[in-house]
Image (cartoon, rainbow, N blue to C red):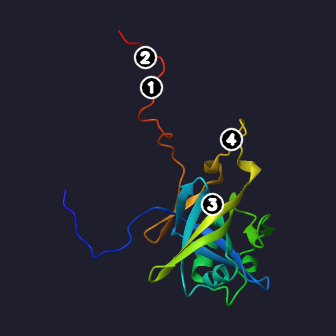
Amino acid sequence: MAKKEWHPGNMLYPLPAVLVTTRNREGKDDICTVAWTGTICSDPAMLSISLRKSRLSYTYVRETGVFVVNLTTETLAHATDFCGVRSGRDIDKFEAEHLEREEASHISCAMVAESPVNIECRVTESKDLGSHTIFLAEVLAVHVDDRYMDENEKFDLNLARPIVYSHGEYLATGKKLGTFGYSVRKKKGRRRA
């Protein structure tokens, strides 16, 4: 198998494509599409987002220190792309994409009501890294849409049909290949001779 070597770049794909909602001190909301996000700690629950300094959402996060990460789905794919290529300086993205605002419970910020999961965050640290600034944030609350609870009252995000971003493309997810630990789990019904 032959491989080609490329210049250093970011090829860590696929990534979650999320809508990050922010609000400035005057109460103006913005939505920004972010693929550079991830879990950084489970106790305390923390995540990160990386934003370009030119983005309006960057200014709002710097100003207020809070934001909401809204997971996206196939039905939100158009809005996800639109909010990544249009500026909140020119347009109200909630109105343009006919998205419903839902108020966060722990911070002054709108959430995307159509999102199956909304994660309220407060910035604990930021670091300028060149083209982007990474914001490390504590998770203050998680809101889940009860339409995606299964018969055992377990949340099933796959029912919402989430999307990911991979090398310039939005992709659907959905085919389960296994569950955590399945590779080492003992098979039921096997007896040793």
Q: CA distance from mark 3 to mark 2?
A: 40 Å
Q: CA distance from mark 1 to mark 2?
A: 9 Å
* Residue highlighted by disc 2: 190
* Residue highlighted by disc 3: 73
Q: Amino acid at mark 4?
A: Lys
| SS class, disc 1 | loop
Q: CA distance from mark 3 to mark 4?
A: 19 Å
Image x and y of residue 4, in percent: 22, 68
Q: In the figure, is residue 138 to the left or right of 186? A: right
Image x and y of residue 98, in percent: 75, 74
* Residue highlighted by disc 4: 154
Q: CA distance from mark 2 to mark 4?
A: 29 Å
Give the class, few, some or many, for how many residues have Cα within 10 Å of label 4's Cα (few <14, many ≥20).
Answer: few
User: Disc 3, disc 4: CB below 8 Å?
Assistant: no
Labelled disc at residue 5: none
Q: CA distance from mark 1 to mark 4?
A: 24 Å
Quarter occupied by residue 141: bottom right
Q: Amino acid at mark 3?
A: Thr
Image x and y of residue 117, in percent: 68, 58
Q: Earlier in the sequence, mark 1 or mark 4?
A: 4
Q: Point out the image quarter for the C terminus.
A: top left
User: Disc 1, disc 2: CB below 8 Å?
Assistant: yes
* Residue highlighted by disc 1: 186
Nearest to the eye among marks 1 and 2: give it: 1
User: Disc 1, disc 3: CB below 8 Å?
Assistant: no
Whether 13 is drawn above or below 79: the answer is above
Q: Earlier in the sequence, mark 3 or mark 4?
A: 3
